[in-house]
Image (cartoon, rainbow, N blue to C red):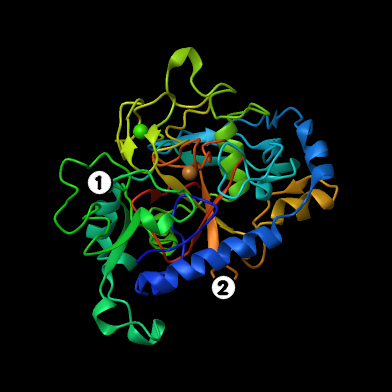
Amino acid sequence: MSAKSISTNQPSSERKKLVWWPALAILIAIASGLAWFKFKPNTPSTNKLAMDAFEPTVENKKPAPGPAPSGMVWIPGGEFSMGCADPTADLCGGTETMFDARPIHRVYVDGFWMDDHEVTNAEYAAFVDATGYITIAEQTPKAEDFPGAPPENLVAGAVIFTPTPEPVPLNNHFQWWRYEHGANWRHPDGPKSSIEGRENFPAVHIAYEDALAYCQWAGKRLPTEAEWEFAARGGKSGNMYTWGSEFKPDGKHQANTFQGVFPVTDAAEDGFAGIAPIKQFPANPYGLYDVTGNVWEWCSDWYRYDYFETLAKSGKVTRNPQGPETPFDPVEPSERKRIHRGGSFLCVDQYCSRYIVGSRGKGEHSTGTNHVGFRCVK
Ligand SMILES: [Ca+2]
Ligand SMILES: [Cu+2]
């Protein structure tokens, strides 16, 4: 059984949870929901401040330090307004952005190179061929790491989105995630599936350390959350989406998200039911593809729900923030989560609108799923 971030549509607990029996997991999910309500802050004054807090982005003038490395684009860095200004907090995002992305605060980042696309299966395969690296989803969970788990559940696998046969209340994501033995980046939809013909799709079922290992091999690193958002905004300020403030300008979809009735039918109005190959939609002003939608992207920061608030309170422009020292998610206090950004092919306004550029996602660091990938910077 899978995991349980109540606040996003991706499961985010570690594999320990995945091998627990469903009933216990559901109880935990309900308890987490209660914890969430307890922690959900009442912040009308912050909201009021945040509503008009966007100030112009000031890009660094310094040109790129040299010719672009293959597949990368120069992000000039500079000072910008980070976060979301949406007025209400909702349990699952819904049509609103959660309080953890507020208030809008001022951040500076240095310039850097960024992959113009999410790391593909072909690229991940080149890394694995060269190094023999084995991802977490391919490793059999050790009994000592999963006390109490039935031995028959200690098998390698990963978490896969599974549509429900009929509409369901959107309060328990265990209804549409399942743990499947033998699923991993080579077998994204389960042991019988493969990446043949999917060379140009983003690599998925990649845990944080699997992403990190790739970046290190490539002489790169993961972006910080601030770098990611600066890059995603493309030099603009205050936009709701990476392309502007209208979700479908001229009626055209700008990213691979979810249409239809979640989680039953993906109507694929954007051209794709489920995951898509890279570069199917226009790039943002910096030349980055699929910053929004398709798969979530790992950032290097730990997740803390109140990190933006802490930075804002300092009253200063924070320079090159690296995230909090330690993770904390009140919904799942015992999980160690890193930041996810950009939303995925499962994001839908009915449930999780984290394709909004200033909004945040999070995931337990050792858990990858079939809608989480990454890109690197240097
Ligand atoms: Ca889609
Ligand atoms: Cu989402």
Relative to residue 259, is residue 171 depicted above or below? below
Q: Which residue is mark 1?
A: 122
Q: Earlier in the sequence, mark 2 or mark 1?
A: 1
Residue at disc 1, secondary structure: helix
Q: Which residue is mark 2?
A: 334
Quadrant for the N terminus, please: bottom left
Relative to the observer, which residue lies in front, 61 or 375? 375
Image spot of residue 253 (x, y percent) = 42, 23
Q: Residue at x 48, y 63 (%)?
A: 364
In the image, what residue type sits under mark 1? Ala
Q: Is residue 203 left or right of residue 76?
A: left
Image spot of residue 68 (x, y percent) = 45, 34
Asked whether residue 297 appears in the rendered view, the answer is yes
In the image, what residue type sits under mark 2? Ser
Relative to residue 153, is residue 316 depicted above or below? above
Q: Residue at x 55, y 41 (%)?
A: 94
Asked whether residue 217 appears in the rendered view, the answer is no
Image spot of residue 176 (x, y percent) = 36, 53
Relative to the observer, which residue lies in front, 65 or 330? 330
Q: Is disc 1 surrounded by few (<14), some (14 to 19) or many (20+) residues within 10 Å?
A: some
**In which quarter of the view is residue 239 placed?**
top right
Residue at disc 2, secondary structure: loop
Q: Residue at x 40, y 74 (%)?
A: 16
Name the mark nearer the viewer: 2 or 1: 2
Q: Is residue 318 left or right of residue 284?
A: right
Q: Is disc 2 surrounded by few (<14), some (14 to 19) or many (20+) residues within 10 Å?
A: few
The Cα–Cα distance between marks 2 and 1, rounded to whole angstroms, is 35 Å
Q: Residue at x 60, y 42 (%)?
A: 359
